[in-house]
Amino acid sequence: MGFKRYTTGVAIAALLAGSAYAQTPAGQSPLAAGSLNPANEETPARVAAPPEFRMADGIVATVNDSIITGYDLRQRMLLLIATTQVRPTEENIPAIQQESLNSLIEERLQAQEIATYKTLKISDEEVDAEIASMAEEVGTTAANYLDFLAQGGIRPQTLREATRVSLGWRALVGGRFASRARVSRGQVDQAMRQIAESASKPQYLIGEVYIEAARVGGQQAALNGAAQLVQQLVQGAPFQAVAQQFSASPSAVRGGDAGWIVQGTVQPALQAALDQLEVGQLSRPIPVDGGVYIIYMRDKRDGAASNLVQLKQVMVQVPEGAADSVVAAATARLEALRPQLSCDTILQRATSEEGLLGSDLGESDVANLAPQFQQIARSGAIGSVSSPVRTPLGVHLVAVCGRRVGGAEAPSFRAVEARLHSQNLVMLGRRYLRDLRADALIEMK
């Protein structure tokens, strides 16, 4: 994974402000490893002396015709340590070294691909502006920002080179895959329907770190690495920075922000953790097929504030005290009519036959509907027409013509579209880099 702006912004902000995770009792959850302690954020941080790494200054790897030296690797390890606040130990130094080497290899591949596009140039002014923006996000100047890194033994050129490649790769992926990443209206509508249909289920706002077994040398290595990261997190490493540098999940580009997860949409092992973790708790490593997860429970909720549904109906008036035979006749009539109806035809059909009444119920909060209609409104497929429903007024057929989440938490069409577009770009960028790596000649010395 390449060096990302968000990682630096979050982690340096944490270092300047002195944020920390505290080791706290796990509470009632055996899956919890610790909890975030906001009170520690006011504790001043000190910049530790740069650790000593025993490695030669010669070439450690070649990527096609580009070399990676021991000095390059040490610089990247120092940068990773500074931005994640993972404290180097004998146990985790190999993992830090491997992650740094992977990062450098991918950065070399990105730089080589960028160089093939003669018109794609990132100027010094653009790099300066990006670094200044990073510094501004954490409330300091670019000079102070670079001085801070220098205290950890990191030369300014290390950050500048990484920033230049990051900007170039972002521009390359965005330009090359702009049309392929485009999201159709149907895709957005489907996503919004899924959001609406899950609105009434328990939901969990989580951060995640996923250690992919194939990338780190097997499942046991992934488990060991995850255990070390959990220890570092509860001792003070910022979750977002660790996620962005170490996680193999697509959410890594957002600092591990996986958003709101709906109950029942994840693997059983993860669901068990979601059910047990309290808000603010960090999980122990959770093994799954192919790797290991670390989950941070940011928030929980029973469901969205409101679930809005659009209904239309056709009915036969039947008084509350009518004979059973009258109710049965009305039910049979509507049952026979039901296969012919849809949201588009139900009102027209109601006006064309004697004894039928049709109405557009508009958009309503499910919670405000008559009890007889609530289950249909919650679970009926969009475009479906219900079986006959008896109410004190008569016998009804109800068509479910739309559903969406309401309230302040409801995402807009544009917000959903932007999220899907961003996800597509991330996926296409990962595939692009994977193909470059597969075609490259990479030699470890």
Image (spheres, helix red, strand yellow):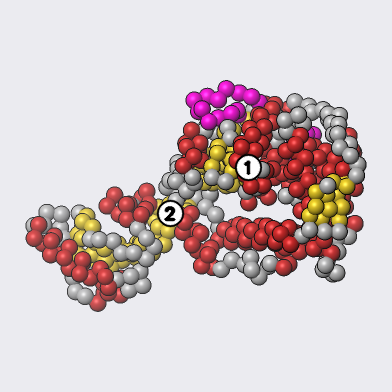
Q: Residue at x 51, y 40 (%)?
A: 270
Give the mark, 2 or 1, whose residue is nearer the N terminus. 2
Q: Residue at x 35, y 69 (%)?
A: 343
The numbered dot on residue 218 is 1
Asked if residue 34 is among those painted magenta in the image, a careful observer would answer yes
| For residue 295, side relative to residue 355 (left or right) | right
Q: Position of residue 424 (x, y in %)?
A: 62, 61
Q: Would you call the spot at circle 2 few (<14 residues within 10 Å), some (14-19), or many (20 or more)?
A: many
- Answer yes or no: is residue 129 visible: no
Q: Quadrant of residue 11?
A: top right
Q: Amino acid at mark 1?
A: Gly
Residue identifier under label 2 = 197
The numbered dot on residue 389 is none
| For residue 97, side relative to residue 387 (left or right) | right
Q: Position of residue 244 (x, y in %)?
A: 69, 45
Q: Which element carries disc 2, helix, strand or loop?
A: helix
Nearer the observer, 275 or 357: 275
Q: Which element carries disc 1, helix, strand or loop?
A: loop
- Answer yes or no: is residue 399 visible: yes
Above or below, 86 against 261 in this view is above
* Measured Cα–Cα span from mark 2 to mark 1: 38 Å
| For residue 396, side relative to residue 120 (left or right) | left
Q: Amino acid at mark 2?
A: Glu
In the rendered picture of this protein, how many numbered marks are placed on residues? 2
Task: Magenta stretch: give its range.
Answer: 10-35
Asked if residue 32 is among those painted magenta in the image, a careful observer would answer yes
